[in-house]
Image (tube, helix red, strand yellow):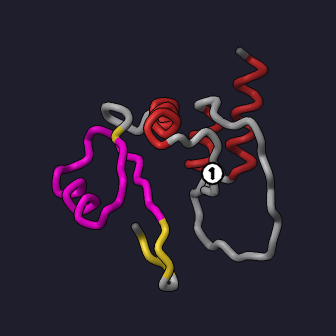
Amino acid sequence: MGKENGNNFPHLIITSEQVTKDCLDYLNSQNISWIAAGKNQIDLAKAMEILADEFNIDRLAIVGGGKINGGFLEAGLVDEISILIGAGVDGRTGQPSFLIIVQKAVVQSLCN
């Protein structure tokens, strides 16, 4: 269990099979659940299958940036998109934006 503002809440880490034993030992020592899905990189479809089968999770919200959101889109694992718009400042450069990832996914779906 993790702790934020004095409240306990569950954590679940998704990793590839390349994770080190030291990392898994740390997660286990902190009572943080983990699943390894994918040989060299995370296989999101396999991870979602494990979440459904082992944790009885059949719906979740992905709150990420361009890479995480895009990974789920490219894997065909998104059935709904909600966009929240608010004021914010992000000075990072070279980060893929959500809209570029969506555009890429739409073009791919039209071309296949």
Does 79 appear above or below 10?
A: above
Category of crowding for the residue at label 1, using alpha-carbon neighbours closer than 10 angstroms: few (below 14), some (14–19), many (at least 20): few
Look at mark 1 in the image and give the residue it sits on: 62
Residue in the picture at 63% in, 47% down: 60
Does 88 appear above or below 14?
A: below
Q: Quadrant of residue 89?
A: bottom right
Measured as percent of width and height from the top left, residue 4 is found at 49, 79
Q: Which residues are magenta?
A: 10-35
Number of numbered discs overlaid on the protein picture = 1
The front one of 73 and 51 is 51
User: Viewed as shown, does residue 90 lie left or right of 82?
Assistant: left
Does 43 appear above or below 100?
A: above
Question: Which image quarter holds the C terminus?
Answer: top right
Measured as percent of width and height from the top left, residue 10 is found at 46, 62
Query: Magenta includes 109?
Result: no
Residue in the picture at 73% in, 23% down: 109
Q: Quadrant of residue 23?
A: bottom left
- Residue ranking furthest to the top: 112
User: Viewed as shown, does residue 18 lie left or right of 109?
Assistant: left
Question: Which image quarter holds the N terminus?
Answer: bottom left
User: Viewed as shown, does residue 76 lie left or right of 27?
Assistant: right
- Residue ranking furthest to the bottom: 6
Identified by mark 1, the residue type is: Ile
Residue in the picture at 47% in, 74% down: 8
Measured as percent of width and height from the top left, residue 104 is found at 70, 35
The front one of 45 and 73 is 45
Residue in the picture at 51% in, 84% down: 5
